[in-house]
Amino acid sequence: QVQLVESGGGLVQPGGSLRLSCVASGTVFSIYDMGWYRQAPGKQRELVGTITRANVATCVDSVKGRCTVTRDNAKSTVYLQMDSLKPEDTAVYYCHSKYFRLEYWGQGTQVTVSS
């Protein structure tokens, strides 16, 4: 059974930083393209950033310059570094994996940006 477990969320002041982690188990992590999504209250889930199995990383325009996605295949882990956090970054952040038609989601980790 494939499992994705996120961690690293919490309460952060505006302007602060967070690094989220997502550990995969039950599968060969290196074959998956990985992504981070977020869902704010009352809004649809949206993409934040991705990293392919070839280690090509991108972030969406709304967080570009503040977002870094990396992976460590030896640890079966993908990371999301978010800097200069804003209150509008408050959301549940989800890890996603995809290999052709195989897709999995983590349970999410709450990030709250507030003073």
Image (spheres, rainbow, N blue to C red):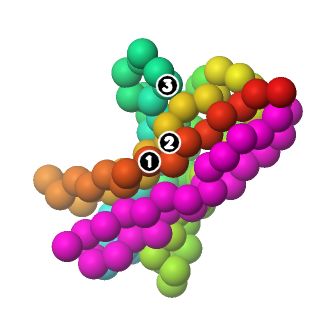
Q: CA distance from mark 3 to mark 2?
A: 9 Å
Alpha-carbon distance for marks 1 and 2? 5 Å
Say which amino acid is labelled 3: Ala
Q: CA distance from mark 3 to mark 1?
A: 12 Å
The residue shown at (20%, 73%) is 1
Residue 40, label in figure = 3
| 55 relative to 30, above or below | above
Q: Is residue 87 above or below residue 47?
A: above
Helix or strand or loop: what does disc 1 sit on?
A: loop
Three-letter amino acid code of the residue under disc 2:
Tyr
- Give the residue at mark 1: 108
Q: Which residues are magenta?
A: 1-27
Chain-order first, disc 3 or disc 1: 3
Residue 55 at x, y percent in the picture: 51, 62
Asked whether the residues under the numbered discs 1 and 2 touch, taking CB atoms below 8 Å apart as contact, a structural biologist would say yes
Residue 36 visible within the image? no
Seen in the image, is 26 located left or right of residue 96?
A: left
- Residue, far bottom: 74
Amino acid type at circle 1 is Gly
Give the structural element (helix, strand or loop) at label 3: loop
Q: Secondary structure at mark 2?
A: strand
Residue at image coords 61%, 29%: 90
